[in-house]
Image (cartoon, rainbow, N blue to C red):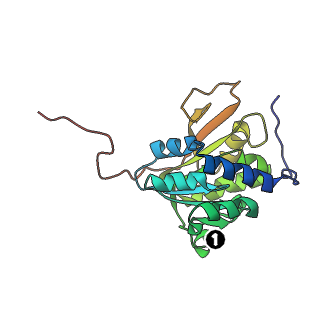
Amino acid sequence: MYVSWETGAMSTGRDYEGYAAKMRRHVLAGTDMEVDVRFVDMMSRRCACVLDIGCGIGNAVNGLRARGHAAYGIDPTPEVLEVARDLYDPSWFRRMAAVDIEPGTLPLNGLPGAYDVVLMSGNVPSFLSANELRKTFRQVAELLEAGGIFVVGTTTVIQGGPMDQDKAAAGSGLTLSHRFSDWHLSPFHAGSPWSVSVFSAPGSRNLAEVPDGMFVLRG
C-alpha cells in the first residue's frame, strides 16, 4: 500500500549513533556502497560540482571525489557527520538540513552556490514533510546549473516516494527525465520497491571539452 502525507515531519527517536557505527564498520570492512556514486558519475560531466543532501557518513562524497568530482555533503545529524569527518576530509562536509540549501546560504557556509548535480538518496525524502520536500525541490532548482540534474533515490511505498516527488517537482522548474527501479537502470514499474528519479533543470548541460567516451573514426 502506498503511504503519502501532507503535513508534519518524520518522527524522531532514531538510533543515529547505532546507524553511524554500523556504517563505519561497513566502510572499514571494505563493503561496496558506491552504487549511487557510479550512477552519478555516469550521468554527470567530468569534474562536476556535486552536492549530496543527507550525505550520512560521507561515503558517496568520498567516492565522487575519488572520481575527480568536486563533491560536498550536508547532513543535519551530528552522529553521522562525526564519522564522515573522521573517515574523510572534514572540509567536504557541513551540518545543514535539506531545507537550508538556499543559494545564498551555502556560500556563507563555505560551499559552492551552484552545482551540476544534486544527489539525495537513501530515503532522505522520507524525513521531510510535504512542504519541506516542495521547498527542497524549489531550492535545488535554483542551485542547479543549466541542464543540471537532481538525482533522488528512495523506497517507493513510504512518504517522499516517487509520487510525492512528482508533486513536489510541479512548479519548481525541474522536469522528470528518467526513472529507474534501481541504480543499475532497470525499468521502473508500478510494483518497483525502489526508485531512482532524475529531474533536470532547463537548458543544456555544460559537457567536457574532451570526447568523454565519444570517438569518431575518420578516414
Q: Secondary structure at mark 1?
A: helix
User: Looking at the figure, which quarter contains the N terminus?
Assistant: top right
- Residue shown at the point (57%, 57%) measured from the top left: 51
Q: Is residue 38 above or below residue 209?
A: above
Q: Position of residue 116 (x, y in %)?
A: 49, 55
Examine the image and state in which quarter residue 218 appears: top left
- Name the outermost residue toward the front: 29
- Residue shown at the point (56%, 27%) measured from the top left: 186
- Residue shown at the point (54%, 32%) measured from the top left: 184
Check disc 1 and give the amino acid type: Thr
Crowd around label 1: few <14 · some 14–19 · many ≥20 (10 Å):
some
Q: Is residue 102 visible?
A: no
- Tell me: 145 left or right of 55: left
- Tell me: 119 left or right of 75: left
Q: Position of residue 34 (x, y in %)?
A: 56, 44
Q: Position of residue 20 (x, y in %)?
A: 73, 54
Q: Nearer the viewer, residue 203 or 72?
A: 72
Q: Position of residue 102 (x, y in %)?
A: 64, 65
Residue identified by numbered label 1: 105
User: Looking at the figure, which quarter contains the C terminus?
Assistant: top left
Q: Is residue 207 visible?
A: yes
